[in-house]
Amino acid sequence: MTRAALLLATILVAAPAAAQEQWKPEGPVPRAADGKPDLSGVWWLGREPALIEGRVGSPRRGEAPPPAPGSTFASLYQPWAAAKAKMLSDKDDPALRCIPSVGGPPQTNIFQLVQTPKLVVLLQETYHGFRLIPTEPGRQHSDMQPPAYWGDSVGRWEGDTLVVDVVDFNDRNWISPQGIVSFHSDALHVIERYRRIAANALEVEKTYDDPKVLIRPWVDKKMYRLAVFDQVMEAMCTGTETASLMEAAAKENYGR
């Protein structure tokens, strides 16, 4: 079944049937030729962004929407940062101007991993971006990497867990990809842990540490499903006119 056909079928499924759907991690973890768990595949949260009622990810009547990933992050701001956050809202989200969030890959709904003996490639559907994660023993961060939106990544295996150290961020984007105030500084340091716990399940834990902005590190943990489609779609960032519309609405309603 194609990706488009899968999404169309999901939209047409009745809500009672969707409510009865059960999912659980199952099946043996596949292994690469070197014996490491094979993380390759397209991974998603089991839903698309809630754009229309009834689509995967849209909360059904009586359900609360899933928690926004940056909301807890913002609760850990130092006093000066908390004061700054009160002056910001979703209209200030850099993502409205096609600037990808730190929490993009893999914090958004869908991403793809391609694993080789020396490198893991992370393909992000939103913004159609990518990250390269070298995993050779002894690999160090690049001295030539300028500060970047997604930082500089270096991976290592700890048993069956891929641990990725990410540094060298710029400070021009937010953590959350969903319009939640979640700015950070250039001192941001992220540790990611990828663990395939079953044939159809990938656990991703991310620890954000920013001594300039946070009172303590913030840990975000998610469970991703193996998608039935085998590649991410092209999803370029367009429609930046939304930013000016939101700014105009904010000025009309709140005077800023």
Image (cartoon, helix red, strand yellow):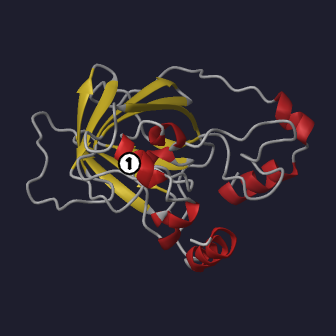
**Image height check: is 235 above or below 209?**
below
| Residue 236 visible | no
Classify mark 1: residues with Cα within 10 Å, few (<14), some (14-19) or many (20+). some
Report helix, strand or loop for mark 1.
helix
Specify whether 198 is left or right of 116: right
Residue topped by disc 1: 81
Looking at the picture, tell me which residue is in the foreground, 218 or 121.
218
Residue at the location (43% across, 50% down)? 83
The image quarter containing residue 100 is bottom left
Residue at the location (49% across, 64% down)? 95
The image quarter containing residue 215 is top left
Residue 177 horizontal/vertical position (percent)? 51, 54
Residue 192 horizontal/vertical position (percent)? 34, 35
Residue at the location (57% across, 21% down)? 27
Residue 203 horizontal/vertical position (percent)? 48, 29
What amino acid type should be assigned to the residue bearing mark 1?
Ala
